Structures are given as structure tokens and as C-alpha cells.
Amino acid sequence: MRVFINPGHDIDLDSGAVNPNYGTRECDVARNAGKMLARYLQTAGCEVRTLQSDDLGLVCETSNEWGADIFVSLHCNAFNTVARGTETLYKSYNGQQLAQLIQDQIINSINTVDRGIKKRDDLWVLNGTDAVAVLVEMAFIDNDEDLEILNNDLDTIVRAIARGITDFGG
């Protein structure tokens, strides 16, 4: 199984969301999560490619040219410093199945708010790839409680994402 990982945002050009109290950047959390996810999936026997870039056309084109079976974009949510939780976004029927497997694994692994899976037709990375695609909003980076989960339990979250992917592909 070929899995393409897209850690959200660009380290140099677009930090994504930033925690207002600690300055933690979404792009850095996503990069770390992407590196861990690649290692876990390779250990499980998957072929993996990773690209972190704000050029989403390039990201999707690279995934498509490589022939990815699964496309996973990793992000941290942000809203009003109060919202909390994890949600997984999808577009297609197969994406819905993958999203549910990933969401269930995360919710069963950490103490977070289950914001569920959500169908999104308006996201470039879900529309631009030929693979079964999901976008995982791991936690709200602008909420200090969720930031603590990202700081202390990122490995647990990433392992849960890997299990959801291998459950889908297995």
C-alpha cells in the first residue's frame, strides 16, 4: 500500500495556526507528526512519501504521479481558544470509511473531544488527489489543553492514525 503524507503548511512560508500563549506553530507539529507517521507506516510495510508544502497543486500532483493509494494531510485546528477536540475530514465514500477508522483509533487512544468525521467538498487536498484522501485535524493548537495533548501525546495520536490507515488497507 502506498501512503502519501502531507504535513500541513510550509515551515518557511506559512506557519498555519499558532498558539497565542506559547507560540507553538501548526507547521512544526504537523512536520513532527508526519515524520513519525512515515516511520510507523514503513515499519508496517507501507511505501511512504511525504511532502510538506503550501503549493497544494504540487502536493496533489506528486501524490498522483507516484500512484498513492491513500493520502493523509495532517493539521491542527484553531478557532477561538475554547474549542477542543479531534476531527477527520473526507470527501468520498472510501474517504469516509478511512476517516472513521482513523477517528475511532484516535478517540480510543487519547482523552480528547470527539468532533467526529465531516464531509468536505471544498478542500483542495481532498479534491486534487486521486487517492483515498483524508485530512486529520489532530487537536486545536490555539487551546492550551489541546496543546498539552499535542505536546505530550503526539506519538499516541500518530500511532492511532497509522492503525486507522493499516486497518483500512489491510
Image: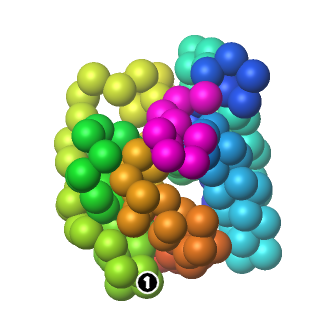
Dot 1: element: helix
Tell me where residue 127 appears, x and y as whole percent: 38, 26
Can you see residue 95?
A: no
Amino acid under label 1?
Answer: Ser
Magenta stretch bounds: 15-23
Is residue 79 rendered to the left or right of residue 30?
A: left
**Is residue 159 toward the left or the right of residue 19 in the image?**
right
- Provide the residue designation for mark 1: 109
Q: Nearer the viewer, residue 117 or 98?
A: 117
Work out whether 155 lies above or below 60: below
The quarter holding residue 86 reads bottom left
Most prominent secondary structure in the magenta stretch? loop
User: Which of 50/83 is in front?
Assistant: 83
Kindly indicate the quadrant of the structure image that contains residue 99: bottom left
Image position of 114 with respect to 126: above or below: below
Q: Quadrant of residue 78?
A: top left
In the image, residue 103 lies at what x, y percent? 34, 67
Q: Position of residue 100 (x, y in %)?
A: 29, 65
In magenta segment, residue 108: no
Rendered residue at 31%/46% (across/down)? 81
Residue visible at 78% across and 75% down in the picture: 43
Tell me where residue 44 appears, x and y as whole percent.
72, 76
Residue 19 painted magenta: yes
